Image: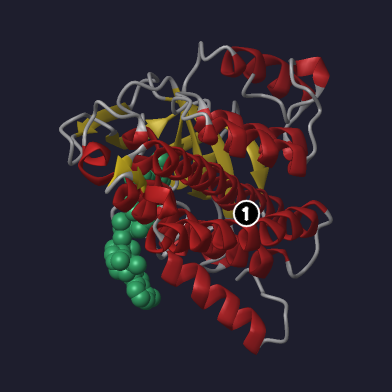
């Protein structure tokens, strides 16, 4: 079900970018669980469709769709966080493939994942933003050491990997194709988060309206009080105004428009702001029951904060919109 955007021959529904975003919105509105395979499904698979070989797709996509093979993403390094162009992990070509060395960290699900994909420096002389190759490797290969890292909640959500002369890595793209594959996957990921925020915000608004109709205080439903109505009306307006930005960004990205990065950032800001307003209003309208696990509200409330900060903070996306406006609409990727 999660592979709706894949071609039918790989079990998908051939959904367009816009249709996939509708699916993501509804998935989150239904408070469906986080998908263990989402790194592979949403980041690696589109890159394989654009830049992989038929052999790679036939070999890797079916077990990915069934979650028989779980993928982790390996972008971040100890010295390369926000400054991703500071990547030092290297890939050297050999007779049979590639040799990987270096350290990757903060990889979600890598503590138990089977495989990983990420960017490696394959041409050290090519400059910070160039000379990168997009490679896949086996997390159980000789030379890979996985160190699980506990997150705030106590679970081992992250892992760091040391790669010491790891053999046989599989290349997805190199040179400018690697840059564009990573950039396209990033923009699609931002848009998916925006759609998920919109769906979550909608569900929170619905829950708030439902509760305001049912809960009676001072002899009438609390929704009859104007202060409560205003809160919920503001939420409805915010969500309604965010949707056209999401749709326009999806169309721009699908068309490969030069303004797509600006539009994607504007959509993320609008969807995150309106979903956050929905979360605050829903919690306010529910009163004490909203703070409990007995009520379903927490299923959506807890997602908003995480999604709003995912795929770039609100400040980062606002800055990207500002930079694009200052540059006359378009935004250079490097
Ligand atoms: C929940 C979660 C899941 C993650 N999953 C993965 C994953 O699966 N794979 C993976 O590779 N990585 C993953 N990451 C890592 C993520 O990509 C990095 O955290 C991110 O790139 C930031 O890098 P950093 O943590 O090193 O922070 P830093 O880059 O050290 O930044 C620290 C602070 O400084 C700010 N800052 C940095 N530069 C500037 C600047 N120029 N101007 C203003 N402020 C600046 C940042 O905004 C931030 O607030 C995950 C992170 C989180 C939180």
Q: Residue drawn at (56%, 38%), measured in percent from left and top?
A: 135
Q: Which residue is mark 1?
A: 187
The residue at the far front in this view is 219
At x 72% / y 86%, what residue is drawn?
328
Task: Name the one closer to the observer, 95 or 312.
Answer: 312
Work out whether 66 lies above or below 314.
above
Q: Nearer the viewer, residue 326 or 136?
A: 326
- Seen from the viewer's position, the closer of residues 307 and 42 is 307
In the image, residue 125 lies at what x, y percent? Answer: 54, 65
For mark 1, give the secondary structure: helix
Q: How many marks?
A: 1
Mark 1 surroundings within 10 Å by alpha-carbon count, few (fewer than 14), some (14 through 19), many (20 or more): many
Inspect this view and state whether residue 327 appears.
yes
Residue at 44% over, 66% down: 314
In this rendering, the answer to whether 60 lies above or below 271 is: above
* Quadrant of picture, ligand 1: bottom left
Task: Confirm or reject: label 1 Cβ below 8 Å from ligand 1.
Answer: no
Q: Residue at x 40, y 36 (%)?
A: 214
Name the spot of residue 157 as percent of width and height, x first.
28, 32
Q: Quadrant of the C terminus?
A: bottom right
* Quadrant of the rendered image containing residue 139: top left
Residue 272's x, y, as percent? 48, 57
Q: Quadrant of the N terminus?
A: top right
In the image, is 14 to the left or to the right of 308? right
Lateral position of residue 147 relative to residue 240, left or right: left
In-image side of 19 versus 291 (left or right): right
**Residue 104 seen from this side:** no
Instruction: Please name whichever residue, 92 or 35, is drawn nearer the observer in this view of the structure.
Output: 35
């Amino acid at each position: 079900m999660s592979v709706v955007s894949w071609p039918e021959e790989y079990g998908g529904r051939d959904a367009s970018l816009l249709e996939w975003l509708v699916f993501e919105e509804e998935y989150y509105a239904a408070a469906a669980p986080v998908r263990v395979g989402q790194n592979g499904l949403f980041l690696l698979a589109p890159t394989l469709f654009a830049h992989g070989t038929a052999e790679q797709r036939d070999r890797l996509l079916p077990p990915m769709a069934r979650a028989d093979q779980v993928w982790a993403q390996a972008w971040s390094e100890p010295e390369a966080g926000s400054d991703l162009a500071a990547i030092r992990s290297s890939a050297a070509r050999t007779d049979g493939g590639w040799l990987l060395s270096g350290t990757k960290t903060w990889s979600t699900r890598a503590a138990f994942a089977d495989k990983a994909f990420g960017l490696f420096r394959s041409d050290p002389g090519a400059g910070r933003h160039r000379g990168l190759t997009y490679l896949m490797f086996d997390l159980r290969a000789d030379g890979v050491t996985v160190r699980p890292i506990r997150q705030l909640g106590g679970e081992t959500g992250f892992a760091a990997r040391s790669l010491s002369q790891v053999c046989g890595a599989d290349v997805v793209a190199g040179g400018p194709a690697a840059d564009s594959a990573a950039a396209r996957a990033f923009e699609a990921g931002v848009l998916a988060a925006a759609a998920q925020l919109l769906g979550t915000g909608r569900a929170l608004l619905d829950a708030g309206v439902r509760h305001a109709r049912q809960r009676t205080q001072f002899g009438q439903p609390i929704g009859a009080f104007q202060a409560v109505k205003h809160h919920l009306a503001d939420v409805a307006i915010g969500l309604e105004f965010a949707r056209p930005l999401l749709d326009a960004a999806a169309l721009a990205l699908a068309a490969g428009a030069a303004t797509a990065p600006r539009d994607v950032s504007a959509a993320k800001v609008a969807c995150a702001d309106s979903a956050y307003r929905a979360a605050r209003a829903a919690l306010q309208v529910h009163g004490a029951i909203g703070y409990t696990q007995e009520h379903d509200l927490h299923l959506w409330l807890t997602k908003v904060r995480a999604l709003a900060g995912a795929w770039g903070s609100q400040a980062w996306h606002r800055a990207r919109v500002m930079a694009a406006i200052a540059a006359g609409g378009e935004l250079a990727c490097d």
